[in-house]
Image (tube, rainbow, N blue to C red):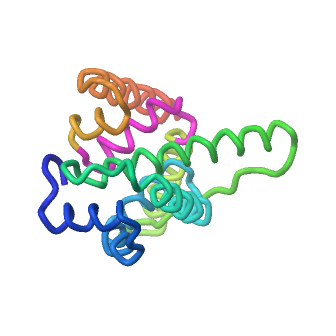
């Protein structure tokens, strides 16, 4: 959905800007799975990811006058979602610092393996990888998730994060290098 939005999306954006709630639902509903995937990867907990997406969509509705019919909606919504994830991570960090609970480990799906031993090793590696992604500095994690995991183009990630494409390339490279070092230690 990079580049120019289609005419149907442009018409929906115009209706949304005018305050049409049904048009807003029609506009964002197909994008919710991608937004959920992004927030889940950022936060690691499904319930928190759902809350963040719901808050992001509420914020998008409030900021609907800023929607530009000439630009795709997904980067706009992804930026809001990432900002909400950052807020959630800051609140989580403050709560942990103050001793108000621990972050929960998300449920991770395992790939069916030919033997229980292989499955156990794969699951442990997946959990370790997920944990190390969660420990990455925020900018590295965002770039890695958007570009390498979600498969977005460097151009789109650069637009969403407000940085150059070269900076995206550098962040993804550094994130992969850090992960490789951390995971290969064991």
Q: Is residue 173 left or right of residue 132?
A: left
Q: Please say if 132 is above or below 17.
A: above
The N terminus, quarter of image: bottom left
Q: Is residue 68 left or right of residue 2?
A: right
Q: Residue at x 82, y 51 (%)?
A: 101
Q: Position of residue 115 (x, y in %)?
A: 41, 69
Residue at image coords 41%, 56%: 64
Identified at 30% across, 28% down, the residue is 168
Task: Report whether residue 107 is seen.
Answer: no
Residue 99 appears in which quarter of the rendering? top right
Report x, y in % for residue 153. 21, 41
Main SS of residues in magenta:
helix
Q: Nearer the viewer, residue 177 or 138?
A: 138
Please identify the quarter of the rendering in which residue 110 is found.
bottom left
| Magenta-span inclusion, residue 173 | no
Q: Which residues are magenta?
A: 134-152
Task: Give how far across and how far down residue 170 sits, in percent.
Answer: 31, 22
Whether residue 175 is situated above or below residue 109 in the rendered picture: above
Relative to 177, is 136 on the left or the right? right
| Residue 143 appears in the picture as rendered | yes
Q: Is residue 148 magenta?
A: yes
Query: Residue 83 or 60: which is nearer the viewer?
Result: 60
């Amino acid at each position: 959905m990079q580049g120019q939005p289609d005419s149907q999306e442009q018409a929906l954006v115009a209706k949304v800007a005018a305050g049409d709630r049904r048009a807003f639902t029609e506009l964002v509903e197909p994008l919710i799975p991608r937004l959920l995937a992004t927030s889940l990867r950022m936060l690691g907990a499904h319930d928190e990811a759902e809350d963040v997406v719901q808050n992001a969509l509420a914020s998008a509705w409030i900021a609907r006058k800023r929607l530009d019919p000439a630009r795709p909606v997904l980067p706009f919504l992804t930026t809001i979602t990432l900002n909400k994830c950052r807020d959630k991570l800051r609140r989580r960090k403050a709560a942990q610092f103050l001793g108000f609970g621990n972050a929960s480990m998300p449920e991770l799906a395992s790939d069916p393996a030919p033997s229980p031993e292989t499955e156990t090793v794969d699951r442990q590696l997946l959990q370790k990888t997920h944990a190390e992604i969660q420990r990455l500095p925020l900018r590295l994690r965002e770039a890695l998730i958007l570009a390498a995991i979600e498969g977005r183009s460097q151009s789109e990630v650069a637009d969403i994060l407000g940085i150059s494409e070269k900076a995206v390339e550098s962040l993804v490279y550094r994130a992969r290098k850090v992960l490789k070092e951390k995971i290969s230690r064991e």
